[in-house]
Image (tube, rainbow, N blue to C red):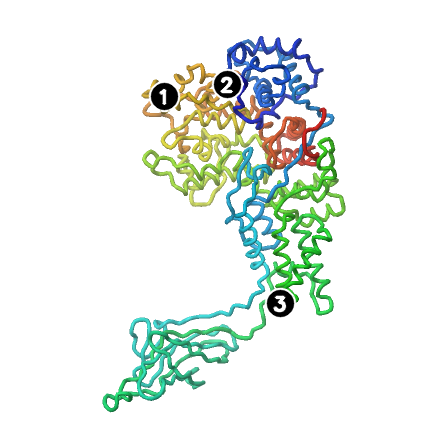
Amino acid sequence: MKFTRSIPVLFGLALLLSAPRARAAHFEKDILPVLKLFCYDCHGDGAQKGGVSFDTFDSQAKLMKDMDLWSRVLSQVSFGNMPPGNKRQPTPNTRQKLLDWIETDVFKVNCNNPDPGRVTIRRLNRTEYNNTIRDLLGISFRPADDFPPDDSGFGFDNIGDVLSISPLHMEKYLIAAEQSLDKAIPTGPVKLSSKTLDSERLQGGRDQGGERILVSNGEISASYDFPMAGGYQLRARAYQHRAGSEATRMGFLLDGRSIGEARVDAEKNDPGDYEKTIRVQKGRRRLAVSFLNDYYRKDGPRNLRGDRNLIVESFSITGPLNQPPPEPPMSQQRIFFKKQTAANQEQVAREIIGAFATRAFRRPVEKEELDGLMAIWLIPIHKGESFELSVKLALRAALSSPAFLFRGEVQPDPDNPNKIYPINEYALASRLSYFLWGSMPDDELTQLASRKRLRSNLAEQTYRMLRSNRALGLAESFAMQWLQIRNLDLVTPSEKHFPDFDDQLKEAMRTETEMLFKRVVREDRSVLEFLNADYTYLNERLAKHYGMSGVKGDNFRLVSLSNSPRRGVLTHGSVLTITSNPTRTSPVKRGLWVLENILGTPPPPPPPDVPDLDDDKEVTGATLRARLEMHREKPVCNSCHQRMDPLGFGLENFDAVGKYREKEDGALIDTAGKLVTGESFTTPAELANVLVDRKRDEFVRTLALRMLTFALGRGPEHYDKCAVDRIVHEMERNDYKFSSLILGVVKSVPFQLRRGEGERNGG
């Protein structure tokens, strides 16, 4: 039976030890004996622990082609997870010989001739679209919030291979383009201010539930403060009770002076609007309508009998009229940077549309593209529409263009996988800006790219961008995905077990983690503080949940953890809640979370015939730790649980919603543990120290590969090992400062270069 692919390559491919490369060993002579001596007890001679077996392949060639298998071997052996601690261990030289063979003979990694890989052309995700509209048009508007959710791959929602596009997307893009430009360039008629005074604000006559009636000659009036001098339209909504041979006559009065009359012929079921234009000075004025021709006759011919009345429902005041149009908003002024006349109209339109398209496309607009946009501009112009509206139509086309919606890079030889070239400086500007800001390049980046000076000033520009508040967006775009904090939206702790948990507490947990990440970014602190920070950010609600005093109000503030058992993100309520079950903690989930997101060495999924802990009848009724230890005694469960469970037990002092506790069901909680590689700890703080001191390399490499994946928008490949090595070296030289991580990614081969489609020939 062949090896079953239970996990993708994911991040294990780059988690390698950095050492001088030895000559590739010959498989039969040097490698096969090592596998038989140290691996076959569990992964050969019929044994297939974790779904891995080395002796079930038809040939050596087929064995060496199974990249998933060797990626797992590489990550597990390089960090000492395999062979397990209770098995015979190879010498460091033997271990390195196996690693070198995998790199050179299986993956053919050659850091002297690195493969930068290629990035699939991809659409802007929802965050990138919103940010780009904001920066392109200068408006506060989030049209992409109405788009379908983005798919995720390799933990992030900016991966080109999963960012599909549907007919619904195209419909939403067209709507978003129109709505965005309507806000940036308001070309419709100017809306006049209008105020309606209902019957409750009117005086005179008799109130009869939402309207006022004059049964004899008289007035209905109201006072109104006119904001400025000018012309206004006074409208009275009214109807009559018909009687006699003539219609009801209604007079208009301003400050007691008659200014005209109207004939009211509307009746109850269809009231009419009767208008009068007036000119007033600024200030408080008295408006009124009068009943001018009262009529009442009780006897006589039927057509002459009746009672004529005037009924008024409301007054409306609209204006001031004929005011000059308001000054265009800054968004419109920025787009229409040049004035047009009848003589230069087309040339100015070409300049405006060309400048906009260049910014929207993140590169110089091509002549054919601009000609197409100008053809659209001509359509409404020939129909007599305004210059602004015609330009606006062309800009809508630009915002619906693939050049705006997609991020792609022009390739000189796209079908040649052995052709490697630096991406051009406009593409480099886009990679940098969407990586750090989640948005289009600003003017400074674009100007440097236009002069081909961005690459030579890349470090300076990276530091400049990290100092901007826009870089704090990495907390949401990167950190919340890396740490899986977005899953907070999906968790629903049991109301019975945790009655104090609510959306406000959930949001406070999210904010705590975001603010820790933002501090590391803003102050360029060590990334190791993600694991061992002796401070956090709390408001009163979260501090009370944590059992900490002295924090008041809804605002978050920096709080020392020197006298607290908490350290770093592992003890944040956000992480502890997303790694729990609705009614209890889950050491397995917590341990798995650490392995996946902190150490980058996830175990394979459990075999399908292994029951969940809650469903395992043999272990119910015992304490959680005892039940897990009994569960782990099963041979099929042991290899994975001995890696996950100690990490999870180290966090058992925190319940399923992150509240500290020392006992569970009256019994003291035992948080002591020992990792498969031998490191021991007794408290959550000691676990954090173990991860920082003894597992630093695993953590830093995992973080580097996650950041590289996010920056590139593609999944990791085995040849990214060279880039990760250099990024980690950059971080080690600079005390693991956050900027060294970012600069290492930006300077890396896969960030600056690309190749054609397909697999390269040779290494």
Closer to us: 119 or 195: 119
Query: Which residue in the structure is indicated by mark 3?
Result: 385
Amino acid of disc 2:
Gly
Q: Is residue 518 visible?
A: no
**x, y percent for residue 325:** 58, 69
336 up-or-down from 170: above or below: below
Distance of label 1 from label 2 (alpha carbons)? 20 Å
Q: Secondary structure at mark 3?
A: loop
Q: Secondary structure at mark 1?
A: loop
Categorize mark 1 by other alpha carbons within 10 Å: few (<14), some (14-19), many (20+): few
Categorize mark 3 by other alpha carbons within 10 Å: few (<14), some (14-19), many (20+): few
Closer to us: 250 or 542: 250
Total numbered labels: 3
First in sequence, mark 3 or 2: give its number.
2
Query: Which residue in the structure is indicated by mark 1?
Result: 616
Query: Which residue in the structure is indicated by mark 2?
Result: 50
**x, y percent for residue 68:** 58, 23
Amino acid of disc 3:
Glu
**x, y percent for residue 700:** 59, 28
First in sequence, mark 1 or 2: give its number.
2
User: Disc 3, disc 2: CB below 8 Å?
Assistant: no
Amino acid of disc 1:
Asp
1 or 3: mark nearer the eye: 3
